[in-house]
Every structure is written in structure tokens, then in C-alpha cells.
Amino acid sequence: MTDAPQLRPRRPGPDADGILEPSPYPLVSVAIAVIAVVVITLVGFALGTVDLGLSKALNALHTGAVGAFTTAVYHVISPAPAIGITVVVVAVIWWRTRSLRPALAFGGTIAVTWVPSAVVKEIVHRARPDVAVLPHPFPVQPDPGYPSGHTVYITAFVIALIWLLRETRWHRLALTLGVVAIVVVFFSVSIDAVHYPTDAAASILWALAVAPGVRVVWVDWLMPRIPFLRPGR
């Protein structure tokens, strides 16, 4: 007998609920994640400026209160604030549960879903919408745009939060507000025109497909091998 993950449903133990609940089909989740990374990366090379017209149309909305709001959203979940938000939430989870396991399961799932998207961004190197043709251009961003790190982050954050709360009365609220947050970020980065809409759409698909595989690798496979993160700790 081995402790390798099997391709069949498994029942969670008493110390495994919420985000710690083992995936019933771990190998499927990991395979989907790997395939998604490859496919989303390849699609990025083919997009070019296919949705520049839509970017211009959405950017025309970047006026008054709408423009101020979307710009604020973009800044609030930029990398440094996003890391700070995640650290604070991890600390709150640790405090409330008195356990590092759900806290680090939450933080690790977000980080390992989010960070590799920056690598793909450099590989694909899709330019952001041309500020010269936008009605309300945002300051030029130095890095490529595909996929959108902001959108990957918020989607991964929402997914991890939904998993964390799925055994609680807050699950439905987290799901509802999470979907709203993802939609808000999608339109914010598109209206700011710091990303093409297809950048943001691909980022949502990235997180939805990759996060379950990441959770399997980090929570189900690696955390139990770390002494202070083993079940019961």
C-alpha cells in the first residue's frame, strides 16, 4: 500500500473540512490545471489586438465617478496591497481557527495560483491596449498584459474563500459577493484599459481551472508532509 493520491472519491476525515477537505479526484484536478496553463498560454499568442475596439468602447466609460472607482479598484489590488490583504486575512483565519493549517491552505492556494500567471505574462508578452488610441488612457504600465494579474488574484482569492467557508453559514454570502467582486475587477481593468477584456476573461478561466489543482498539490499532497502542518496540528 502507498499513500499516493488515487483516482477515486475519498471521504474527508474529522480534521478535514472547508478548504482542507481532500479533493475526490485529485489527479483530474491537477491534469485540468496543467492543460489549462498550456491552452491559455497558447491562446495568448494568437489574440493580438482582436478586441481593441471593445477596449476603446469600455474605456469611453472612464469618466467621473466610474473612472475614479475603477482606478481605485486597480490600485487597491495591485501586487503590494494584494499581498498585504492576503497576509491580513491569513492572520485572521489563524486567529479565528487557532490553526495554521486552514490559514496557510488559504494563502498558499492563492499565491500558487496567482504567481505563475506573471511568468506566463512574460512568456506571451502581449502588449496592453495602445494608449495613443484610447479616449481616456491610463498611465502606461511597464509589463505585458496577458493574463491580468489583478483578475487572477481576485478570482483565486474568491475561490479560496468559498472553499474556506463552504461548511459554514457564510458560504452563500461569500459566493454571491465573490462573483460580484470578480465582475467588478473584470470591468475595472477593462474600463481603465490597462488590459484587454480578453486578458481579464482568460485570467478568470485561469484561476477557475488552475486553483483546484493547486489546492490538491499544496493542501492534499505537500502540507501533510510538513511536520507543523500535518493533520491534528
Image (cartoon, helix red, strand yellow):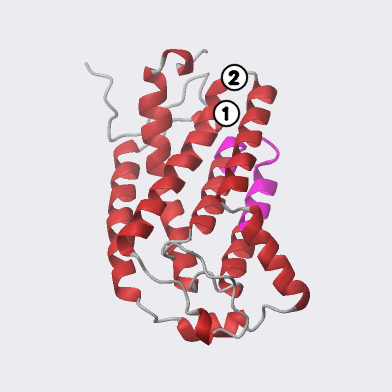
The quadrant in which the N terminus is found is top left
Q: Is residue 132 left or right of residue 181?
A: left
Number of residues whose C-alpha sits closer than 10 Å to that of mark 1, classed few (under 14), some (14–19) or many (20 or more):
many
Q: Nearer the viewer, residue 113 or 27?
A: 113
Q: Quadrant of residue 220?
A: top left
Kindly identify which residue carries mark 1.
Answer: 103
Q: Nearer the viewer, residue 57 or 160?
A: 57
Say if 188 sits above or below 164 in the image.
below
As drawn, the residue found furthest toward the left would be: 1
Say if 202 sits above or below 3 in the image.
below
Say if 53 sits above or below 71 in the image.
below
The prevailing secondary structure element of the residues shown in magenta is helix
Residue 153 is situated, as x and y percent measured from the top left of the image, at: 53, 51
Q: Residue at x 50, y 31 (%)?
A: 105
> Which stretch appears magenta?
161-181
Residue 182 is situated, as x and y percent measured from the top left of the image, at: 59, 59
Q: Is residue 84 left or right of residue 69?
A: left
Q: Amino acid at mark 2?
A: Ser
Q: Quadrant of residue 226?
A: top left
Kindly identify which residue carries mark 2.
Answer: 99
Residue 69 is situated, as x and y percent measured from the top left of the image, at: 72, 66
Q: Residue at x 50, y 69 (%)?
A: 195
- At mark 2, the secondary structure is loop
Q: Is residue 74 left or right of residue 105?
A: right
As drawn, the residue found furthest toward the right would be: 65
Say if 217 sits above or below 227 in the image.
below
Asked if marks 2 and 1 touch (Cβ < 8 Å), the reply is: yes
Distance, label 2 to label 1, CA atoms, is 7 Å
Q: Residue at x 61, y 53 (%)?
A: 77
Q: Is residue 38 left or right of residue 133?
A: left
Asked if one can make out residue 42 in the rendered structure from this viewpoint, the answer is: yes
Q: Amino acid at mark 1?
A: Ala
